[in-house]
Amino acid sequence: MPSRRVIVAAAAALAAIAAALLLPLGQWGTALLAAVRDAGAAGAVLYGAIYAVATVLWIPGSLLTIGAGFVYGLAGGTMVVLPSAVVGATLAFVIGRFVARDWVRARVSGHARMAAVHAAIGEHGFSIVLLLRLSPLFPFVLLNYALGLTDVKLREYVLASAVGMIPGTFLFVYLGTLVTDAAALAAGERPDGGVAEKALFWGGLVITLVVTAWISRLARARLDRALRQA
């Protein structure tokens, strides 16, 4: 029988999924961005808390990351998102290790490479977690829970995750800085300005994407070598 905590977590996840399907999240997102922007430091703390909870509930954080760039700019958005993502990922890791091991094991059973990760991570915990964060080998939210099943130390997991999340966080926060209107952000639109603004938008976007993809490719190649040697 699953524990009451597992049942509560599952119910919360189902509620979040239902909200995403049935409720006007675009309008809510616009209202949230306006509220946190007007609330100063308290708004940033609230935004970070929402981000961490969303991570635990298996809700992809890309839109929230973009929103942080829109509200707080590149440096401020990164400072809000990165610690929040690490906190959320750490909570998910702890839940996966101590609360919902059987449930997480069932979710990752179809991933053949997870066994290789489990074998390699014992002696090279920090480097394997770092490469996993830099490489799109596993979905972010799944990886948070799946690594709780391995022997990696919590300290290594937190430090490697914090470093490995930097490129992806930077990319999506940067995308948010290019949005000029909250309603456009909620609708998934990009900014529409003059020739110079469009050149800056596309040039910066291409450079950021290329650098992120290059880092990801290098990380995946190194990770593949590490897993083959495990």
Image (cartoon, rainbow, N blue to C red):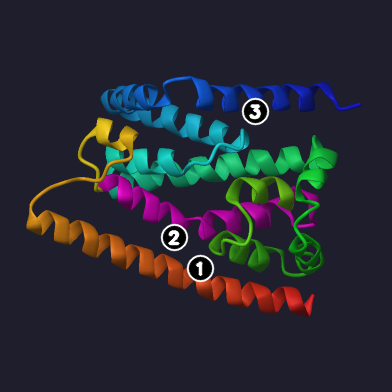
- Residue 17 location, x and y as percent? 59, 28
Is 188 placed above or below 15 here? below
Which is more toward the observer, 164 or 187?
A: 187
Q: Amino acid at mark 3?
A: Ala
The dot on residue 142 is none
Callout 2 crowding tier (Cα within 10 Å): few <14, some 14–19, many ≥20:
some
Q: Are marks 1 and 2 in contact (CB under 8 Å)?
A: yes
What is the magenta segment's predominant secondary structure?
Answer: helix
- Residue 198 location, x and y as percent? 15, 56
- Residue 229 location, x and y as percent? 77, 79
Secondary structure at badge 3 equals helix
Q: Which residue is mark 3?
A: 13
Which region of the structure is painted magenta?
148-177
Secondary structure at badge 1 equals helix
Q: Residue at x 67, y 75 (%)?
A: 224
Q: CA distance from mark 2 to mark 3?
A: 28 Å
Q: Does residue 80 appear to the left or right of 201 in the view shown?
A: right
Q: Residue at x 66, y 47 (%)?
A: 142
Report if residue 226 lies within the magenta region: no
Q: Which residue is mark 2?
A: 167
Q: Amino acid at mark 1?
A: Ser
Q: Does residue 4 appear to the left or right of 193 in the view shown?
A: right
Is 178 placed above or below 22 here? below
Quarter of the image containing the N terminus? top right
The dot on residue 216 is 1
